[in-house]
Amino acid sequence: MALRSCSTLSPQSVRSPPSLPCAAKQQIALPSSSSSSCFGSKKNVVLRFSGGAGTKRAGSYSRSVRSSLETLRPTVGKVTEVNKDSFWPIVNAAGDKTVVLDMYTQWCGPCKVIAPKFQELSEKYLDVVFLKLDCNQDNKALAKELGIRVVPTFKILKDSKIVKEVTGAKFDDLVVAIDTVRSS
């Protein structure tokens, strides 16, 4: 059985159920086949936690989880919520597809008004990846990196580069910008 270092989980990244102690005091290496790579593996992973000597509860616990790398693939036909950690990997994985990013905040009225229309666009343009980023404190660095000044702001990317921007809840302008980038 081959082991991949990129599939190694630390005890801090794996949480056991609150009722069972985690006996994993070392890194957990996950098995892999020689034909699959670290990125793009579609296999579920089974993590086992065992109660050993000195623990309150003996026995074992199994949990099947999906690899977080698998969820970083661009999807079409729906809007995908991204954050500072997942944005660039998804954009890079989109390759030459057009990517439209809705940068919004929870408290923004115009953002709430245009959100259902943005969802409809994701269902209409199946060759485009639609993402949304909540520009809260957690994502402040990414929002600054992308140059946000007002919300909502829509960034349109092609080949991992920003090629168009629409500021405000201007639906017609957004559709024109998407069509322009798609046809280029």
Image (tube, rainbow, N blue to C red):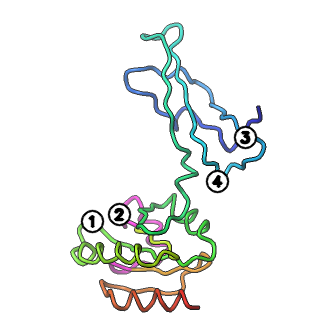
- Circles 1 and 3, Cβ within 8 Å, touching? The answer is no
* Residue corresponding to mark 4: 40
Mark 1 falls on what kind of element?
loop
Q: Residues within 10 Å of mark 2 (few under 14, many from 20)?
A: few
Q: Which amino acid type is shown beneath numbered disc 3?
A: Arg
Residue at 66% x, 33% y is 29
For the C terminus, the quadrant is bottom right
The part of the image, by quadrant, that contains residue 165 is bottom left
184 vs 147: above or below: below
Mark 3 falls on what kind of element?
loop
* Residue corresponding to mark 1: 106
* Rendered image: mark on residue 136: 2
Q: Which amino acid type is shown beneath numbered disc 4?
A: Gly
* Residue corresponding to mark 3: 4
Q: Earlier in the sequence, mark 1 or mark 2?
A: 1
Q: Is residue 135 magenta?
A: yes
- Circles 1 and 2, Cβ within 8 Å, touching? The answer is yes
Q: Earlier in the sequence, mark 1 or mark 4?
A: 4
Q: Earlier in the sequence, mark 1 or mark 3?
A: 3
The answer to whether residue 68 is left or right of residue 172 is right
The part of the image, by quadrant, that contains residue 30 is top right
Q: Which amino acid type is shown beneath numbered disc 1?
A: Gln
Mark 2 falls on what kind of element?
loop
Give the CA distance from mark 1 to mark 3: 40 Å
Q: Which residues are magenta?
A: 133-153
